[in-house]
Image (spheres, grey):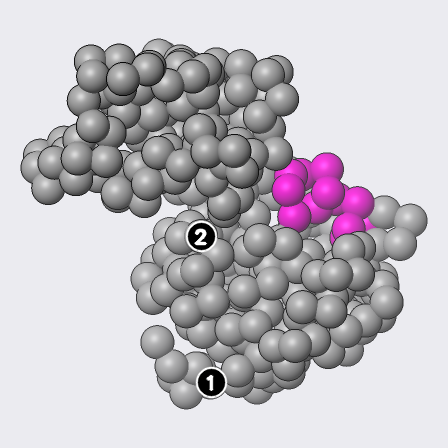
Amino acid sequence: MSTQTSTTSTRTVAVLGLGAMGLPMAARLASELTVHGFDIDESRLLLAAGHGVERFDSARAAAAGADAVLLAVRNGEQLSDLLFGADGVAEVLTPGAVVILTSTVGTEAIAATVERLATFGVALVDAPLSGGPVRAGEGDLLIVVGAEPTALAKARPVLELLASTLTVVGDNPGDGQALKTVNQLLCGVHIAAAAEALALADALGLDRAKTLDALGAGAAGSFMLTNRGPRILEAYSPEGAEVLSRLDIFVKDMGIVGKATRAAGLPSPLAAAAEQLYLLGQAQGLGAQDDSAVVKVLAPTLRSR
């Protein structure tokens, strides 16, 4: 989508958090917008500068004067601290600016965040995303949005640069988080199922790479099987799979799913089983590895041939 369709003058965006997703998003945005960047890791700031992102020494300095502030945080606690903590950025935001939340934090934190931002004349655009770092850098993300129309209009120049699929779920912040929670239920279960299938293939003496190719070409195929399958095969190498999505992120996300299903009075046995696999992986020291490492919870080693 082109930003030319937007009627707003949003030109400067601050990206706070230059991790696996924040950095490629900042680089993508810098192709057409002025981007201010901040991360507590100096090495990430150096990488961002190489992509045309202006570096700042604090989140406050990066956010001051920006039309939009894009947040890539891990959870609701980080969201609250970044906005309203001792060095929170809310106090330096220009009235009329928008905060674009791209992270999956669940619906619980949203209402209080909206209320507190409103006291500064700032709106929240709830825009959790999916797609991974490569697609982030290419502007090929799926973004689901819950936002009041005026705030959404201000955020569109940012969102349209990042998304190939931009779905407006509703006019209320929290609507995006709700749909992303459903999305993560499926993603978490699908990754666990792919790992279980490839572990079984190995236990049965099958060539795992040929099995993956065959499964991906048939009715058993899925995006997660195709995407995570090769990394599941790499999980047993000495260096492991490249970390594109940490296992402990799914500990967080499946926890959000569990809270949502319990609040709705809805049984979710598949989500609960998948959550336990990620929790076991974290307990075994796999939390910082790629989420494909969940296969090692099921099969700690490969069968000998």
Q: Earlier in the sequence, mark 1 or mark 2?
A: 1
Q: In the rendered view, tell whether residue 185 sits above or below residue 51.
A: above
Q: Is residue 184 left or right of residue 30?
A: left
Q: Residue 69 at x, y = what percent?
A: 66, 66
User: Residue tagged by mark 2?
Assistant: 132
Residue 45 is a magenta residue: no
Q: Residue 304 at x, y = what percent?
A: 32, 15
Q: Residue 250 at x, y = what percent?
A: 50, 31
Q: Splitting the image into 4 quarters, where does residue 154 fall?
A: bottom right
Residue shown at 85% from the left, 47% from the top: 85
Mark 1 is surrounded, within 10 Å at the Cα level, by few (under 14), some (14 to 19) or many (20 or more) other residues, namely few
Q: In the rendered view, tell whether residue 169 sits above or below residue 273.
A: below
Tell me, for residue 276, which label it has, or none: none
Q: Nearer the viewer, residue 207 or 150?
A: 207
Residue found farthest to the right = 86
Which amino acid type is marked by label 1?
Thr
Question: Does residue 62 appear anywhere in the picture?
Answer: yes
Q: Nearer the viewer, mark 1 or mark 2?
A: 2
Q: Is residue 91 left or right of residue 135?
A: right
Q: CA distance from mark 1 to mark 2?
A: 29 Å
Q: In the rendered view, tell whether residue 195 sits above or below residue 112.
A: above
Which amino acid type is marked by label 2?
Gly
**Magenta region's main secondary structure?**
helix
Residue found farthest to the left = 218
Mark 2 is surrounded, within 10 Å at the Cα level, by few (under 14), some (14 to 19) or many (20 or more) other residues, namely some
Q: Residue 234 at x, y = what percent?
A: 40, 36
Q: Nearer the viewer, residue 186 or 147?
A: 186
Residue segment shown in magenta? 73-84
